[in-house]
Amino acid sequence: MEILEIETRPIEGQKPGTSGLRKKTHVFMSPHYLENYVQSIFDGIGGVGGKVLVLGGDGRYFNAQAAQVILRMAAANGAAKVIVGVGALMSTPAASHLIRKRGTDGGLILSASHNPGGPEEDFGLKYNMPNGGPATEGVSDRIHAATQTLTRYKIAETADVDLSAPGQARLGRMEIEIVDPVEDYAALMEELFDFDALEALFKGGFSMVFDAMHAVTGPYAKAILEGRLGAAPGTVINAEPKPDFGGGHPDPNPIWAKPLVDRMMSEDAPDFGAASDGDGDRNMILGKGIYITPSDSLAVLAANAHLAPAYEGGLKGVARSMPTSAAVDRVAEAMGISCYETPTGWKFFGNLLDAGRATLCGEESAGTGSDHVREKDGLWAVLLWLNILAASGKSVAELMEAHWQRYGRNYYSRHDYEDVDAGVAGEMVEELREQLGTLPGQKVGGLTVESAEEFAYDDPVDGSRSERQGLIFGFEGGGRAVIRLSGTGTVGATIRLYLERLETDPAKLGDDPQEALAPVIAAAEALAGIKARSGRDGPNVIT
Ligand code: G1P
Ligand code: ZN
């Protein structure tokens, strides 16, 4: 095996966003692009000499080739061992678990999450740390700094490694362990949940559909739901991971998983519906005739987690990203536990989980998780819901209704304006930022602004500060609008507008969040003028 040192030059724009580096696939496939970034990860974490890494991905187009490049580069950079999933597949939560279980020096995950895949679509690469969680801002900054000074990368010249079955291989002195990507993860789920009760639930005729959206969770869901728990064959649909996710967006929300939503709203809907995203960390939860928002799901899970074996001792605390609704705050208050509000992105939960301050975490973007790994975990959320349904004997709708009656309902919606001119979006944020001091007391679109601030987070564990994490506008009467720019898009800018209003009067609980939020939506538009600035009639995606 010959080790080559290839001369290269820094490539512009290799700055990790909310979750690793995401670019168009053809950009990642362009000369030196992937190699430069991989070498920068290695350099940014202090080299990989003698280290052990986990490697896997969501199976999207270029996944398999990129994995081979990473193996050759790890070998050339002196790594001791890489543990890789069969076919270079591994869900993000499973990778997080494997990093922790084997005590490795971290891992590389090939994924652009819920973004579509294919030669014309998106690709991504993220580094996870030895705690199994996404690279912190500090580490991401070092990786980015390395991309800006890079002059060479190291790569071994060798044939592709056969990753088609579990086993051992070598590249020079580097050991490669090829593992079944499902096995360890399934064993962990069995430790956390009451599998006997779940098996009995399915035996008793409980029906569900799990839409894997042609992404990586297919094999996991099949093995656990159909294989281990005895759910009817065919429960898991779109179960085969495909390089282009069957041409869809593997994003489990009412827009991209519409066929599932339609089925759950139909007369002959099964008892439970769920979906997961490209790399298996997001989830969507539905009951017969009801869609559960991710913010509500977090709150219901927090209120009922004690029904599952892993959490029967209670929760140490909960955490949510700032734009996520305050539904879980009300549960935490009732339980007398802490509720932390963090910036968007799972990396901000890591310290709280490591320090034992939080047990459950969640984001409005369909991410829920716990201290069992250091990533959000789609299938885990589904299994916790199932465990709660089995233990309580209630339906999804009954649980949700009872929850709203007890805690009130935080009406919630997110409006996305995608692919807006980056200059226009940046200018909007700048202008709003300048007005923050003068907005309180002003009337906008029928509501009076009560507070206007920019979110900054002081990590209570390591004392680090993260600024400019979103603009928050509070309105008299309790409404809230948050505006921030996405950090995961690959074209232009995506403006995210998060809307929320709490209703505690049981007599006023209605069905349509857009209706319940109409005054807040109007006030936000009057304030920010997103439609006018972007030249759009409305958001591209409403969740
Ligand atoms: C989005 C979500 C965020 C999530 C991230 C990675 O980031 O909003 O909650 O952690 O994807 O899945 P954004 O594009 O908003 O920066
Ligand atoms: Zn994801």
Image: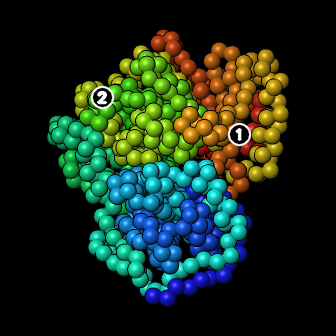
The kind of residue on which mark 1 rests is Arg
Q: Secondary structure at mark 2?
A: loop
Q: Earlier in the sequence, mark 2 or mark 1?
A: 2
Q: CA distance from mark 2 to mark 1?
A: 37 Å
**Quarter where residue 400 is shown:** top left
- Could you classify mark 2 by the number of other residues whose Cα lies within 10 Å: few (under 14), some (14-19), or many (20 or more)? few
User: Who's the residue at 80% across and 19% down the image?
Assistant: 442
Image quadrant containing the N terminus: bottom left
User: Who's the residue at 37% across and 67% down the image?
Assistant: 83
In the rendered image, which residue does mark 1 sit on?
468
As drawn, 105 above or below 93: below
* Cβ at disc 1 under 8 Å from ligand 1: no
In the rendered image, which residue does mark 2 sit on?
313
Residue 115 visible in this rendered orientation of the protein: no
Viewer-nearest residue: 310 or 429: 310
* Cβ at disc 2 under 8 Å from ligand 1: no
The kind of residue on which mark 2 rests is Gly
User: Who's the residue at 29% across and 56% down the image?
Assistant: 184
**Quarter where residue 160 is shown:** bottom left
Q: Secondary structure at mark 1?
A: loop
User: Who's the residue at 49% across and 71% down the image?
Assistant: 49
Q: Is residue 354 left or right of residue 309?
A: right
Q: Is residue 379 left or right of residue 473?
A: left
Residue 105 place in picture, x, y as percent: 45, 60
- Could you classify mark 1 by the number of other residues whose Cα lies within 10 Å: few (under 14), some (14-19), or many (20 or more)? few
Residue 355 place in picture, x, y as percent: 45, 38
As drawn, 275 above or below 158: above
Residue 406 place in picture, x, y as percent: 42, 15
As drawn, 148 above or below 190: below
The mark closer to the camera, 2 or 1, is 2
As drawn, 307 above or below 140: above
Image quadrant containing the C terminus: top right
